[in-house]
Amino acid sequence: MHFIDFRSDTVTKPTEEMRRAMFTAEVGDDVYGEDPTINRLEALAAKMLGKEDALFVTSGTQGNQVAILTHCRPGDEVILEAESHIFFYEAGAASALAGVQTRPIRGHKGAMDPSDVKKAIRSDDIHHPYSGLICLENTHNKAGGKVIPIETMKAIYEIAKEKEIPVHLDGARLFNAAVALGVPVTEFTQYVDTVQVCLSKGLSAPVGSVLAGSKSFIKEARKWRKRLGGGLRQAGVLAAPGIIALEKMVDRLAEDHANARQLAEGLAAVPGLHVDVAGVETNIVLCDIKGTGLSNKEFLTRLKEAGILAVPFDEGVIRFVTHREVTSDMVQTAIERIRQLVR
Ligand SMILES: *Cc1c(COP(=O)(O)O)cnc(C)c1O
């Protein structure tokens, strides 16, 4: 069966153009800095993200963890949102690898209140850890692809600068946020010191993320990537589709957002399902199924039998993600099948 796959935008396969670019990519040993395609991707990413330099990393998790390792020392405290990916979905890497302790702050629609961040910053006291880093996430996955407002990022950045604490942005889906607001990504990145962006989600590259920051930060980050075994050799074959992702796949994210809205509206009209349609800002739809009387497992089994895939999120909440391989017609088909299966 050919599934309509709403599990994640990570399921997108490389385009024909990406595969051709992989085949013909000029390569060299990147640990010697000699892979021209990687060098081109890193220069392009730095420019687009408004930072001095950038580093190609194997995954979003590696990008975030290299950032924490580079910014912090063991025993530092990292302030982050209570449902952020770094806190929730990175297998405890921040403590396992960097030896930091996390300080989760409950946000509203994924956004931490700047005054809560300010209160969480440690004072100069022998009993306290150092506040080593503040992490933001935009768009916020667990909150349902919400865009963290630029003003909120600015306010947190100003507090951080006053206290001389660096700010890292988990921008796995930052381009979705930029497309949703119709602004360049630099509107967001001007208020952070470092940023990680995934190439392999909605942007459709097969592998990889980029981490961007100052020249001195990236120099140190490159060493941490090496320590983690992330020093790659002729990885230009992986960077080539990443260049296409950044140059050609950003604008089309608007289609994914339109399809997500279509899906949200369709599901909201199904008896027993509840969707906050107005809250669908990008390519993620959270659907509350409690009114159907079905468990997550029962609902997902029925979905699968109807040729549709999605993932459980919270108790009674299912996440649907739109992406390049789900068309508007497929969304319509999915809505009709779901209407049947909850009856
Ligand atoms: C997917 C994701 C990551 C991590 O990306 P991987 O490439 O899967 O390691 C980080 N942060 C957020 C918000 C994500 O959605």
Image (cartoon, grey):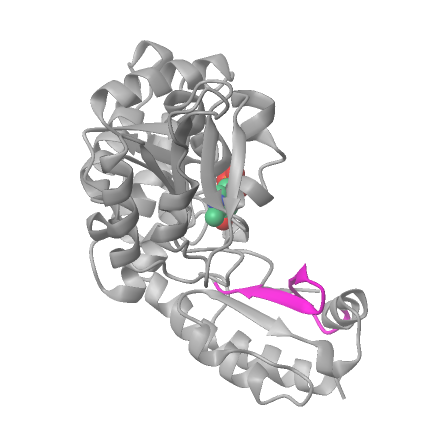
Image coordinates of residue 208 in percent, x first then y, are 44, 36
Q: Which part of the image, by quadrant, shows the C terminus?
A: bottom right
Drawn side of residue 288 relative to residue 305, left or right: left
Q: Residue at x 21, y 22 (%)?
A: 215
Q: Is residue 259 magenta?
A: no
Identify the residue shown where x is 18% and y is 40%.
50
Answer with the quarter of the image where residue 170 lies.
top left
Residue 198 visible at all? no
In which quadrant of the rendered view does residue 124 lie?
top left
Q: Nearer the viewer, residue 81 or 180?
A: 81
Q: Is residue 291 left or right of residue 326?
A: right
Instruction: Looking at the picture, tell me which residue is in the foreground, 211 or 255.
Output: 211
Q: Is residue 82 above or below residue 331?
A: above
The residue range painted magenta reads 305-322
Farthest-out residue, top: 32
Q: How far across and down, in percent of the image, does residue 75 sit?
A: 51, 21
